[in-house]
Structures are given as C-alpha cells and as structure tokens.
Amino acid sequence: MTGAVDGDSALGEGHVALVTGSTSGIGAETARNLAATGATVVLHGRDRAAGEELVAELPGEGHAFYAADYTDFDEVRALADAVLADFDRLDCLVNNAGTWQGDRRLVDAPGIDDGVELTFAVNHLATFLLTDRLADRLVATGERRAEQRDGENTDAAADPARVVTVSSDLHRRAALDLAGVRGPDGPSGVEAYGHSKLANVLFTFELARRLPDSVTANCCHPGVSPSTGLSRNGSLVAGLGWKAFGVVGRLTGFTDTAAESAETQTHLAKSPAVTGTTGEYFDDREAVRPAEAATDRDAQRDLWRASVDWLALDEGEVVGAGADDRAPEA
C-alpha cells in the first residue's frame, strides 16, 4: 500500500521515480529533491562509483543505481529491462540525461546504415527508446494511483504517473532536419545540441497525445547552469569558454546553480499544481509557449516515425500505436 503524500508533493513513500543522468549536476539535485518526498529514487549514469555514492547519501531506503551508456541502444534497453524487473511500479520518469559534443561524432543505430549524430542519439533517440520501453509500467502505475484515490473516497483528482523531459531554450534556434543527423556531414556543437533539444519538445508533445489519461508528459527549460558536466565532451576552447561564462554569470546573476536549475523538473515531477497538465513546455515552473517549430504537428509525426524506424522498433508495439491518425486537439 502506498503511503500518503503531503500537500506539497504528489510523490511520497511507496512511489518510485527514475531520474536519468543523475550522478552529478542537475540530475543529482533532482534526485535529492525527489528522495526528500519519501519516494524511492532510481539513479542512472555512466559513473558507477558516483552513482553508488549518491545512493548512499539519499534519505530513506530502497534507492538504486543502474549504469548505462546512452550511446549504446542495447544498454538503454538493458536499463529499461532492469528497472522493470526490479520495480513493480514507476510513478515518474525524469529524462534528464544529455550531452553536448564539440565535434561531430556518429553512433550506430539499428535502422540507419550511415550512423546517427551522437548528440541527437543521446539526447533524443535514447530518451525515446527508454520512455517507450517503460511506458506500459507508467500507464499501469497511473491506473493504480487512480484506483487508490477512488478507494480513499476523496473528491481530489487522481494524480497520473508523469514523464518529464529536460529540453532547453536553445530549441528556439533550431528547425527539424532529420537528414542532418545522419551520416558524417552535418551540424555539430551548439547547432546539433539545439536541434536535439527541439526534438525533445516535439517528442514530448507527440508522446502526450499518444499516452492515456493515466500518464502525463511535459518538458522544460532547466535554466543556464555552467556548473554541470554537460559540455565535458566539447572542445577545450569551448569548455574553457563555458567555465568563464559561468564565473561571469554567477557574478551577474545571469546563470543558475545546479540546484536552481533542478527546480522546474522537480516541480513537474512532484507538484500537485500540475496534476493532469500534459503536453506543455515549462520555464521557471510556468508553462510558456515554445518555438513555433516545436508546435508543428507534421514535424512531431515525422520525428516520431523516424525514431521508430531508426531504432528498428515494431510500429504496432510502440506507445500509442494507432494514434498517428488521431485528430489534433483544438
């Protein structure tokens, strides 16, 4: 039986939340925030030592860490399978893992002969794959939450399970270019990063349309936090520039600490204020209008179909199968 939660959190004792990319920076702060609600937090990252150290630090019991490299889709599948095997519920998935690459690098994808650009692969395709493989468990958990609410004879609305995907306001500088993420020729650096963050928003809006009422999906801009390890794979010049920007930003108040940057995704993961809210883009804990490119219904469909093809998924088994022709909401 799931324990009660306080008025400030829809997560609490007995609930399970998975935060990807959570061994440091914004992800670690988000994990700490969710553990403080009493929920069991599942951590993910590549650094096992850092992950296990954070597990030991979190309040409460039952927290766990799983290692997976997001450039390897087999490892992403294994991560999902491990979570499904070890936990019988999933109340919240925070897709926080991401990367910023200075140079153009390719990774293998089962449905692409010429490779896919690494930033797009990690920031979008791996996120797509993990979410899809966990979707049924999220749906079932959301239904359990509704049943429990009914059993408590309360008039309060049932709180669905939640998917929170961390994007960036840099998505406003991008336009969807599916051809540009394939093969050796194409954008890199900030252009590739912005494009992957646009994909996060497009994905979220299509996902929200395909999910049943028992799960919500929202995305957010986390703020500007040079203290994270996001740019660790960029060039030396870019890395030094990012650190210098962080020093100036802290002095001027323009940038955020990792803890401050974790506030919006924490809000979306646990706040009763967003119960039932889905298909929105948030900044500073408020729903705001994203770039016009992110609201393009055809682009949302095109990205979804390409992702299914490139990951070699069975179209009839992905989340919301058959929803492609569903009329867009007014």
Image (cartoon, helix red, strand yellow):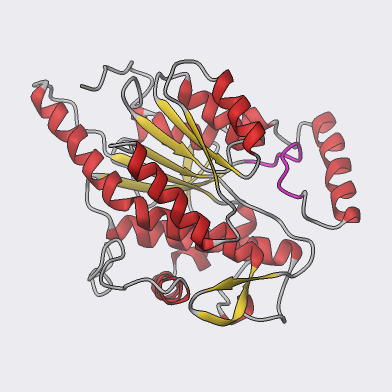
Q: Is residue 167 above or below residue 313?
A: above
Rendered-image quadrant of the C terminus:
bottom left
Rendered-image quadrant of the N terminus:
top left
**Residue drawn 17% across and 34% down?**
146
Looking at the rendered structure, the number of numbered marks drawn on it comes to 0
Residue 198 shows in the view: yes
Look at the image and give the residue range highlighted in magenta. 223-231
Pinpoint residue 33: horizontal percent, then vertical percent.
Answer: 51, 24
**Residue drawn 47% across and 23% down?**
35
Query: Is 150 on the left or on the right of 51, as rendered?
Result: left
**Residue drawn 25% across and 39% down?**
141
Query: Is 106 on the left or on the right of 277, as rendered?
Result: right
Q: Is residue 225 magenta?
A: yes
**Residue drawn 44% across and 61% down?**
203
Pinpoint residue 227: horizontal percent, then vertical percent.
Answer: 75, 36
Q: Is residue 156 above or below residue 206?
A: above
Pinpoint residue 48: horizontal percent, then vertical percent.
Answer: 62, 37
Magenta part, dominant SS:
loop
Residue 173 shows in the view: no
Q: Is residue 1 above or below residue 292?
A: above
Pinpoint residue 75: horizontal percent, then vertical percent.
Answer: 52, 56
| Quadrant hosting residue 304 | bottom left
